[in-house]
């Protein structure tokens, strides 16, 4: 048996299945969490009818989405129209394979870990573009154009803020970056804190969430680039968005908040089963803490105007992250 | 590389072969789409597919860094800016067919392609390849050291070219604008 299926291959297949299952579960849970938090922020209970406190709402919604017909508009480019949702949710799931959930819980520890995620994230813009263009709908097209202008702009400070940590550690490898934060976390150093703030703002912008949700601004563009999508096509876009949120928070946790390290004495660097469980719990606690903050921001702040969005990026975030990078580089050489 | 089934070999060797053939197929199929598509946007997406296939070949060669850069720069930046330009030009409902090439042009293109294939093919088959390629070339450290030591001049020259391109695009973009309040 091991002759035909080498252990490493089995390990790879099993971990891919787990990663995909995790991404789907994460999306299902986050949809409910988002609607509940949104509801309570607006002083209403949120979904409440299906199951106790509406806990089964997502399951029902999932069945509804899957049962719905996937309409393709007559003028649309049918092939691209169907391909776009797949293109939007595959890259973030693939990027999860370099995320270190615990010291021993990482599918592949590539020496280009951070770059791997960033290069996959670049494909996401292409998916939005294809979706918006192939729909043959002016709202979709406007949404896609906005998405590109926004994502291309916010990618620059995002890369610069991550670069701050990378030159600090001297490695793109995720495990090296976590190992460098055994004593202190980068978010609690002056330069690291600035980079963390810039990164988190850009992360919210890259996932196209409010206050930066101009590509799908409901009040102006009906639903932006996914206006024409129904059923599971729409569902896959949402799966992609929630997996992207997970990914943004996972990178933030790994690079700025110590990864799977716990605070002070509550930490373990072991490789045993229970050490792995504890590390995973710390990691997930930080990740979901950040996701809750993202949801909180979304339902608290109004949407920005497009010129404000781009000015904020080009005139504030990029200079700050550039200066931060320069200061870090000088400080490291002193 | 052999594609005959040999039961003494392990399965993953065939998997690697299959992956290699898959990437070659992606690169070639993307190229065919890029050349033959009737709509411009299909051509750009074909180009993107082809570039992903090439990135896959880099992975197959063990140079993850170059593969990631290929996707980040070519698919993530170059293709997106092309799509952006195309999209601003024309939505799909108004897309018109590009004029088809006549038999003379087709023959000329075929001839040039055949010539290039012959030259490249004879070069490939005339070269004596080392049987065991060294696995370390192309790692992150080597690329970084190379860029800052041996190829520093080339690196600076390329950045100069890019700077000229940026200045040029700014000049071009400003031409259409009136000064504020003027």
Image (cartoon, rainbow, N blue to C red):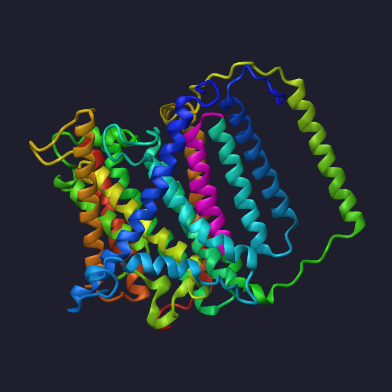
Q: Position of residue A253 (x, y in %)?
A: 24, 47
Asked which quadrant contains residue B1, the reply is top right
- B108 vs B152, nearest the viewer: B108
Magenta stretch bounds? B61-84
Count of marks placed on residues:
0
Q: Is residue B151 above or below residue A242?
A: above
Q: Residue A243 at what x, y percent from top left?
A: 37, 55
Residue A179 rendering spot, x and y as whole percentages: 23, 32
Q: Is residue A265 left or right of residue B180?
A: left
Q: Residue furthest left?
A: A265
Q: Was residue B120 drawn as part of the magenta stretch in this picture? A: no
The residue lying at 49 percent from left, 45 percent from top is B160
Residue at the image position 37 percent from the left and 42 percent from the top: A114
Q: Nearer the viewer, residue A299 or B45?
A: A299
Q: Is residue B125 visible?
A: yes
**Residue B81 belongs to magenta span:** yes
User: Would residue B167 be found to the left or right of residue B110 on screen?
Assistant: left
Which quadrant would residue A219 be assigned to in this image?
A: bottom left
Q: Tell which residue pokes out farthest to the front in this image.
A: A51
- SS assignment for the magenta stretch, majority: helix
The quarter of the rendered structure image containing the C terminus of chain A is top left
Residue drawn at (69%, 72%), measured in percent from left and top? B95
Expressed as whole percent of the image width and height from the top left, the position of residue A318 reads 32, 57
Q: Is residue A260 visible?
A: no
């Amino acid at each position: 048996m091991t002759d035909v299926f080498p252990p490493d291959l089995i390990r790879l297949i099993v971990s891919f299945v787990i990663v995909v299952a995790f991404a789907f579960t994460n999306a299902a849970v986050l949809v409910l969490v988002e609607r509940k938090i949104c509801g309570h922020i607006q002083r209403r209970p949120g979904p409440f009818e299906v199951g106790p406190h509406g806990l089964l709402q997502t399951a029902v919604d999932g069945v509804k989405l899957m049962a719905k017909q996937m309409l393709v508009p007559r003028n649309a480019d049918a092939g691209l129209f169907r391909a776009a949702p797949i293109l939007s949710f595959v890259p973030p799931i693939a990027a999860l394979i370099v995320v270190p959930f615990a010291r021993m819980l990482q599918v592949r520890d590539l020496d280009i870990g951070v770059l791997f995620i960033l290069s996959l994230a670049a494909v996401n813009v292409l998916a939005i573009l294809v979706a918006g263009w192939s729909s043959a709908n002016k709202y979709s097209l406007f949404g896609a154009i906005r998405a590109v202008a926004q994502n291309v702009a916010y990618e620059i400070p995002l890369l610069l803020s991550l670069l701050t940590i990378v030159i600090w550690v001297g490695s793109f490898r995720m495990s090296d970056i976590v190992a460098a934060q055994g004593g202190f976390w980068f978010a609690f150093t002056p330069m690291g804190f600035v980079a963390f703030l810039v990164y988190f703002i850009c992360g919210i912008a890259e996932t196209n969430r409010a206050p930066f949700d101009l590509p799908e601004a409901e009040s102006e563009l009906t639903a932006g680039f996914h206006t024409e999508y129904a059923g599971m096509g729409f569902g896959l876009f949402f799966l992609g968005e929630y997996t992207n949120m997970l990914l943004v928070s996972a990178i933030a946790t790994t690079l700025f908040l110590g990864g799977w390290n716990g605070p002070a004495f509550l930490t373990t660097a072991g490789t045993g089963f229970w050490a792995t469980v504890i590390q995973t719990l710390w990691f997930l606690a930080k990740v979901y803490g950040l996701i809750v903050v993202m949801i909180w921001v979304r339902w608290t702040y109004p949407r920005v105007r497009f010129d404000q969005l781009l000015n904020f990026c080009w005139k504030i975030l990029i200079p700050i992250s550039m200066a931060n990078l320069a200061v870090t580089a000088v400080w490291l050489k002193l | 590389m052999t594609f005959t089934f040999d039961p003494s070999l392990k399965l993953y060797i065939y998997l690697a072969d299959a992956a290699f053939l898959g990437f070659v197929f992606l690169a070639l199929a993307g190229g065919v789409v890029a050349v033959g598509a009737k709509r411009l946007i299909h051509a750009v997406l074909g180009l993107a597919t082809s570039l992903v296939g090439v990135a896959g070949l880099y992975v197959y060669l063990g140079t993850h860094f170059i593969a990631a850069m290929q996707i980040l720069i070519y698919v993530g930046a170059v293709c997106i800016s092309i799509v952006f330009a195309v999209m601003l030009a024309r939505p799909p409902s108004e897309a018109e067919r590009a004029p088809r090439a006549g038999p003379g042009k087709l023959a000329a293109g075929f001839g040039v392609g055949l010539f290039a294939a012959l030259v490249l093919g004879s070069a490939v088959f005339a070269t004596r390849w080392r049987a065991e390629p060294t696995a370390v070339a192309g790692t992150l450290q080597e690329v970084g050291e190379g860029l800052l030591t041996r190829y520093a001049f080339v690196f600076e020259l390329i950045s100069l070219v890019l700077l000229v391109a940026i200045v040029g695009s700014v000049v071009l973009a400003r031409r259409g604008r009136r000064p504020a309040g003027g």
